[in-house]
Image: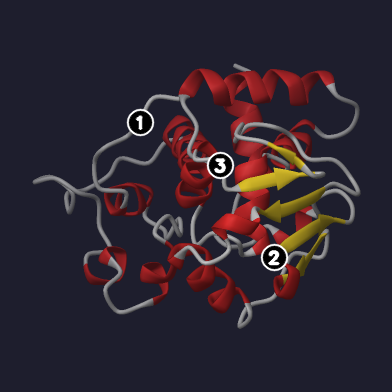
Amino acid sequence: MARYTGSVCRMCRREATKLYLKGDRCFSEKCAFDRRPYAPGQHGQGRIRPSDYREQLREKQKVKRIYGLLEKQFFLYFEKADRMKGVTGENLLNLLERRLDNTIYRLGMASSRQEARQMLRHNHFLLNGKKVNIPSLLVRENDVIEIKEGSRKVKCVTDALEAAATRSTMSWLELDAKNFKGTVKGLPVREELTTPEINEQLIVELYSK
């Protein structure tokens, strides 16, 4: 995928909320959003003209940036969600949560989605005992994600697992930190996606115009 090389903290400031893109730094006093909670740029503190379109666009941009996707990738997920049975917005979040890079992050095997994506690209993980390096792969129920034996002493892995021990894991996932593996117990639960808050209906309204 195309690579964003700018400051990810600018994204949080642009969306006026923490997107938790830098792992533990987002929970510390070094968080840029806590120090400057306004949009970046010389006009960041200017008046904003509210509108329905702006609200819908900002929500779409926020979710796209949370999961680290490009515009075309995000739209393809929306089209797939729209073809599925059920509520389109919830289907969209379900698909995004099931991405392998996000699942690794949710398990606590990486401190951020960006780090999970990089580690995947460098072949540090196994999926059901087989090497995998595709961040966009969608996990299924009973899938087992494991850190390769030769990668278990990598500092970013040990740091992430140590931090994960102090936080709760999503109910649809199970982490076995001692054996460096995690299991997908079911499908993502919408009620757990509250940090940051997402209003998926705004995205549906934007793409439905």
Q: Which structural element holds mark 1?
A: loop
Coordinates of residue 135 in the picture (x, y in percent): 59, 36
Q: How many marks do you count on the picture?
A: 3
Does residue 199 appear in the picture of this structure? Answer: no
**Mark 3 vs mark 1: in front:** 3
Q: Is 54 rendered above or below residue 160?
A: above
Q: Is 187 rendered above or below residue 64?
A: below
In the foreground, 156 or 198: 156
Q: Mark 2 vs mark 1: which is more N-terminal?
A: 1
Q: Mark 2 vs mark 3: which is more N-terminal?
A: 3
Q: CA distance from mark 3 to mark 1?
A: 15 Å
Coordinates of residue 89 in the picture (x, y in percent): 73, 36
Within 10 Å of disc 3 (Cα), the crowding (few <14, some 14-19, many 20+) is many
Q: Say what amino acid the circle numbered 3 marks.
A: Leu
Residue denoted by label 1: 3
Q: Is residue 148 left or right of residue 192?
A: left
Residue denoted by label 3: 120
Q: Which label belongs to residue 137?
A: none
Residue denoted by label 2: 180
